[in-house]
Image (cartoon, helix red, strand yellow):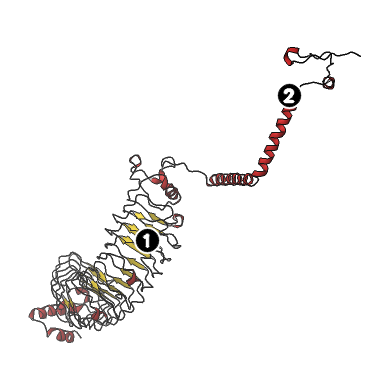
Amino acid sequence: MAPVCFGRYAAPFAYKSLMVVLIALLLLGSGAAALANCPSGCSCNDDTLVVVCQESRLDVLPIALNPSIQRLIIRNNKIKTIDSSMQFYAELQHLDLSQNHLVNIPTKSFSYQRKLQELHLNSNKISSVSNSTFQGLNSLTVLNLKRNLLEELTNGVFATLPRLEELNLGQNRISRIEPTAFAGLSALRILYLDDNQLSSVPTTSFSLLGSLAELHVGLNAFSILPDDAFAGLNRLTVLDLNGAGLFNISENAFRGLPGLRSLNLSGNRLSVVPTSQLSGLTRLEELYIGQNDFITLESNSFHGLKNLKLLEIIGAPQLERIEKGAFEDNVNLETVTFIINKKLSVIEDSTLLGLPKLKHVSLRDNAIVSISETVFIGKELKQLDLSDNPIFCDCQLLWLQELLKDKSNFTQIQCAAPEHMKDKYLKLLTADDLGCVHHDTRQQTIICVVVVASVAMLVTLVLILYRYRKNMQEKLKDYKWNKGRKNLEYHKPISTEEDCIVRGIHPSQYPAPPAHSTGLRPIPVTEL
């Protein structure tokens, strides 16, 4: 069998390659044990069939390894090319040649690796690949070409990889993708094209990827997303446009993505939240939209996203305000993360009310000075982070101080002002420290009831007096007249004998008034 393989392989190669094969055959004649020579700096395990040569200063592929090895990891060495020695490792399932000095890959270098499932060639200097580069890799499911020097993808370049499920082409220099570059990748589920030099979405090329579930195309230079930009990707669940350079999104840019669950729009130049464009993504569960230029999250900013569970806004340099009702339509929200937004100082009352499933709120490192108790129901939260804000600790934050005492898993909050409170932990302060006295709620209720009852009685009395005022005036007049009459009777002089007898005074004992004082002649009294 060996001579047959040798004949098939040696034909295309030069004399040097033939010599390598001859040496290998000589070693084969000495038995498999002779091949299991582990190079210096490598780790070889004949039981697990794994060989690891990491930072071993290898500049060529070793040829004296156990031919039955299944995992070969030669990472961070100085290998410049893949030579003919690769044919001796036909049992390989995992090959990692990342962080080497590979410049190109000779044609049919992997013709004998029909069992290979993962090939990692990332962090090299590969400038081009063709439709014959990966010939023979019928079982390959993962191909990693990240961080190389690729500039274009030609038609049918991956056509020999029918079982490929993940393709990483990120951090290259790709500026051109031909229409049928992805032809034959009927099983592809994950594609990385981030951090390249694409000036527009290669919609035609993407339309061939009917099974694609994840697409990462951020850090390019799209500027605009046209209508139906991702047409044909009906099974897409994750779309990453982080740093794609977008400042305009067409009304129907996301049309044809009925199953999208996660969307990353961070790091673009959007001046407003694209509410209308997002509203059709009814199954969206995660939205990342930080590092954009909008100033306010207005009411109903995320209209239509009824299944949204996570909303993240990190590092939005212009964001100042979140208005009440911004999340009115997002009743399934579980996590909101608004952090490192240096101008965000206002979160209006009731902004996060009406979200029964909300459990995690992070408002770290913003410009929040104070926050109202009515912003959210703190007792229902599992996590709250308000750290690294310029918090002003006064009586308005008494509710938060009490909440921090009850919730041990909430992040500690330090006061930034007033000066005598600076750097103190809000949780450790008292009501007096915050300049307020906390009254018992029941006591306050009783006082309010008493005050209200007193006011009600007073009002009732006034109404009664007003209604019967005429009768009372008449009674008062009668009272005054009777009182005046009695006073007159009391001052009436005693002038009759009967009055003297009634008073127990004999008429003879009663002094007669002086004649000169009345001008009347005294009346003689005759004794009987």
Quadrant where the C terminus lies?
A: top right
x and y percent of residue 330 in the render? 41, 66
Q: Which numbered disc, 2 or 1, marks the residue that appears first in the sequence?
A: 1
Residue 182 circle label: none
x and y percent of residue 139 in the render? 27, 80
Please indicate whether residue 271 sits to the left or right of residue 64 in the image: right
Secondary structure of the residue carrying numbered label 2: loop
Please indicate whether residue 182 sits to the left or right of residue 298 in the image: left
Which residue appears at 33% of the width and 45% of the height? 416
x and y percent of residue 95 in the render? 23, 73
- Residue, disc 2: 491
Name the quadrant containing residue 133: bottom left
Residue nearest the observer in this picture, 342 or 248: 248
Specify few, some or many for label 1: CA neighbours under 10 Å numbering under 14, 14-19, or 20 or more: some
Q: Is residue 512 above or below residue 433?
A: above
Specify few, some or many for label 2: CA neighbours under 10 Å numbering under 14, 14-19, or 20 or more: few
- Residue, disc 1: 336
Name the quadrant containing residue 277: bottom left
Residue nearest the observer in this picture, 320 or 13: 320
Amino acid type for the residue under numbered disc 1: Val
Query: Residue most toward the left?
Result: 15
Which residue appears at 18% of the width and 64% of the height? 55
x and y percent of residue 523 in the render? 82, 15
Q: Is residue 514 visible?
A: no
Please indicate whether residue 63 sits to the left or right of residue 422 in the image: left
Badge 2 vs badge 1, beta-carbon distance below 8 Å: no
Amino acid type for the residue under numbered disc 2: His
